[in-house]
Image (cartoon, rainbow, N blue to C red):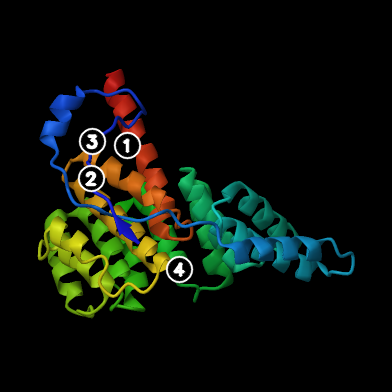
Amino acid sequence: MRFLLIPLLGLSLLGCQSTQKAGEHSAMLPLLPIPFTEPLQPDPRAQIEVARYSELLNSPELTRTQRAELYHIRGKLYDSLGLPQLAQIDFNRALKLKPDLAETYNFLGIHHTLRQEFTQAYERFDSVLELDESYEYAYLNRGIALYYGDRAELAVDDFTRFLASADDDAYRVLWLFLAQNDVDPVVAKEQLAINSQKLSPSAWSTQIVQLYLNQLSEEQFLAGVTQGVQSQKEYAERLCEAYFYIAKRHLRAGNDLKAAEYFRLTLATNVYEFVEHKYAKLELQLLRQALLQKSAV
């Protein structure tokens, strides 16, 4: 665990090219003491598990159901290692063998969302809920798909339902706020303040909500990231979350370049399993698309 001072240089969303002179831009953005750690390394246990399940899948004695479940498990392992293409192949194999695997549809829906294939994503999440209406994370993931698919009002419905089953969860509160903010920023801020009252003051995630309520400055929030951290893995996970929600806050304020830098920092943690890591990449793609559209005008 270590700290580095990282300047937010506002590098071009398109790569090395810059739309402003470096000197001009660096003068606009102050240096902030940003907590930083080495990216998480691939879990060796997960890699061993991949090898073990691959060996098991070679057995001719497996039933269709057993083979489907093994493909699903190996797909989840690939996903946790940041290998989405291999994960998707296994998830599709699993469904061909056993078309009633609700969790498999959920994972495929996430992959469709990340590729901006929103219609297919909605269909996958609908399939999850048809098979198991108690699978609450389908409401989160369908809500996220609706949010990125510019259907914020419908996303609010899904996030509201997701929050209802655990109203002391700061992450559920935050995603509801993000969608509500696209519908009515004033109502969203009021509802965020109301929902925050049920959060535990001692929970790390509550500090993210406090940042959004302007009860903490960005510097204070970053300074508190290390409090109570017990391991390198936990620290990387916290930074993944912190960077992402700071980026979303800057994006909401119109600070696209700062947002892009924080999204890049999110990706640099290598916390592949986290929602924040997955959608940081999509956020950068959307920023690039917006920049290209502006430059084409």
Q: Which residue is mark 1?
A: 287
Q: Is residue 1 visible?
A: yes
**In the rendering, at what x and y percent does residue 33 appear?**
19, 52
Question: What's the residue at 67%, 50% (across, down)?
Answer: 89
Q: Is residue 7 above or below residue 91?
A: above
Task: Please state which of residues 219 and 148 is positioned toward the viewer in this rendering.
Answer: 219
Task: Please state which of residues 166 and 52 is positioned toward the viewer in this rendering.
Answer: 52
Give the label on residue 132, or none: none
Q: Earlier in the sequence, mark 2 or mark 1?
A: 2
Using a 10 Å C-alpha cutoff, classify the residue at mark 2 as few (fewer than 14 neighbours), some (14 to 19) or many (20 or more): some
User: Is mark 4 in CB contact (under 8 Å) with mark 1?
Assistant: no
The amino acid sitting under disc 2 is: Leu
**Gap between marks 2 and 1, in whole Å?**
9 Å
Q: Earlier in the sequence, mark 3 or mark 1?
A: 3
Judged left or right of residue 46, residue 218 is: left
Q: Which residue is mark 4?
A: 137
User: Is mark 2 in CB contact (under 8 Å) with mark 1?
Assistant: yes
